[in-house]
Amino acid sequence: MENQLSDQDNQINVELTEEIAEGIYANLAMIAHSNSEFIIDFIRLMPGIPKAKVKSRIILTPEHAKRLLTALKDNIRKFEDAYGSINGAEDAFRFPTQFGGPIGEA
């Protein structure tokens, strides 16, 4: 009897609906954590609109958060190998106060 699983036994069937496949644009992420979970809020900040909206919230275990970090590092390395360095990755993020929108007057 063979103890190894076949490739078919290791496959996961993932369903991707049309709505989810379209994706949601976010240009800001905020991360919080407790002793049992990481919470990542993906936010869309738009010019001239003073209120940013959370477009998606993902909750992960610490182990899955670390796996995500590893996967992101690997994918960024592969991207930069193919297309060159991503500019501005080391720049300190400054929260935009106007983001190109109108300036209030009294």
Image (tube, rainbow, N blue to C red):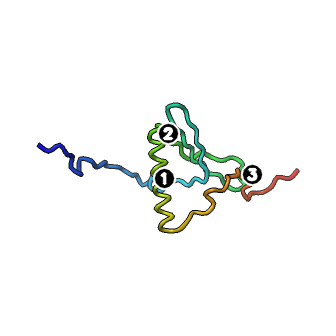
Q: Which of 42 and 82 is in front in this view?
A: 82
**Residue 72 got which mark?**
1
Residue at 49 percent of width and 32 percent of height: 36
> In the figure, is residue 78 to the left or right of 87?
left
The image shows residue 4 at horizontal and vertical percentages of 20, 46
Say which residue label 3 marks: 97
Residue drawn at x 78%, y 57% is 102
Q: Where is residue 98 in the image (x, y as percent from the top left)?
A: 75, 54
Query: Of the residues under marks 1 and 3, which one precedes in the sequence?
Result: 1
Q: Do the residues labelled 2 and 3 touch (CB within 8 Å)?
A: no
Q: Nearer the viewer, residue 92 or 13?
A: 92
Q: Residue furthest bottom?
A: 83
- Quadrant of residue 32 within the rendered picture: top right
Q: Mark 2 points at which residue?
A: 59
Q: Earlier in the sequence, mark 2 or mark 3?
A: 2
**Secondary structure under badge 2?**
strand
Q: What residue type is labelled 3?
A: Thr
Name the spot of residue 62 as percent of width and height, x first: 48, 37
Quadrant location, the N terminus? top left
Q: What element carries label 1?
A: helix
Whether residues under marks 1 and 2 lie with C-beta atoms below 8 angstroms apart, the answer is: no
Number of numbered tags placed on the structure image: 3
Residue nearest the observer in this picture, 59 or 56: 59
Residue in the image at 61% along x and 63% along y: 87
**Is residue 68 depicted above or below 81 in this figure?**
above
